[in-house]
Amino acid sequence: MGLEEKYGPWALVAGASEGVGALFAEELAARGLNVVLLARRQATLDEVAAGIRERSGVQTRTLAVDLATPGAAAEVTAALADLEIGMLVYCAGADADYAALLDKPVSTAEALIHRNCTVLVQLCHAFAGPMVARGRGGIVIFGSGSSFAGAPKLATYGGTKAFDMVFAEGLWAELKPQGVDVLGLVLGETDTPALRRMRHQLGLAATADERPPAAASAAAVVADGLANLGNGPIRMADRKLRLGSRAFFPMGRNLMAKMMAQATVKTMEPRKRG
């Protein structure tokens, strides 16, 4: 069964202006899904959309919305009310600041929490309901290895990504029995334009175009994610991350999530009266 038949006809990709998000949209289009590209920069979105249409022949739509702003989710859902969104891919939310909490106004942390957590929940709530009604659909939530434990200059970002990972696991347990696939795709260091820019700003690279030497390729990460859409709730997106995660989660996140789901169901079952 192809992705169009399983999830289609439209996919919404948040964070689709460059890097992993743009490439994920490209690959979904190559498999027959029409794509909505969501990010802040209209001109960049238009360029990505034009390339996708030329190479894949699918329909595209662009939405220039800053997901860190109040009302962002409502703006997105209103703009897409006429489309059947069969897949939601939430790849927005990179931390471009890489700063300690007290080095920035608290509004910086609040915006990151809003974008990475609140809007994610709002969009999942808006689009998962129709997916359940149709008995099919897919949700991909991009995570980060920074969610494994707290670290300096990543306190808020890592915290939001820990939320995203646990949220993906819980949502998988709720929606999988109703025909909707949920995958938390956890990325390690991945070669993206954003990472290259950050490394250059931190003095770790001579130019903003220098490839991070140990980073996984975006293409490999996307291919792995697409190959594991139905194998939720969590997928570590590259081999190095999978090996490293064993030190943090010897049992494995998927087994942990399944055991938690079973324990919760058992706890919540009405007790039989003898």
Image (spheres, rainbow, N blue to C red):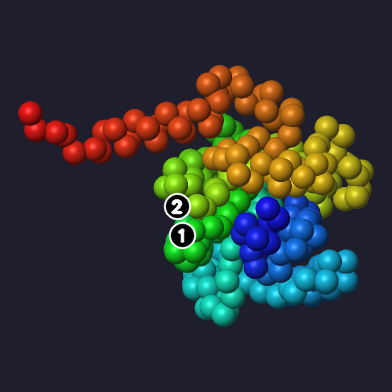
Q: Quadrant of residue 44?
A: bottom right
Most distant residue in the left direction? 274
Q: Is residue 1 above or below residue 238?
A: below
Residue type beneath disc 2? Gln
Which residue is at the front of the view, 30 or 200?
30
Residue 32 lies, in percent from the top left, at 75, 63
Viewer-closest of 181 and 119: 181
Q: Closer to the camera, 175 or 18?
A: 175
Residue 115, image x, y percentages: 55, 59
Which image quarter: residue 66?
Answer: bottom right
Could you give the CA–CA distance between mark 1 and mark 2, rounded to whole angstroms? 6 Å
Residue under the point 70% across and 38% down = 237
Q: Secondary structure at mark 2?
A: helix
Q: Which mark is residue 245?
A: none
The x, y position of residue 12, in whole percent, is 64, 65
Q: Which residue is mark 2?
A: 178
Quarter occupied by the C terminus: top left
Residue 100's place in the image compared with 238, above or below, is below
Dot 1: element: helix
**Residue at figure coordinates x 71%, y 47% from the top left:** 226
Q: To which residue does mark 1 refer?
A: 132
Residue 154 position, x and y percent, is 60, 40
Does residue 19 lie above or below 158 as drawn?
below
- Mark 2 packing: few (<14 Cα in 10 Å), some, or many (20+)? some
Q: Nearer the viewer, residue 40 or 167?
A: 167
Image side of residue 45 versus residue 75, left or right: right
Image marks 1 and 2: residues in contact by CB distance under 8 Å: yes
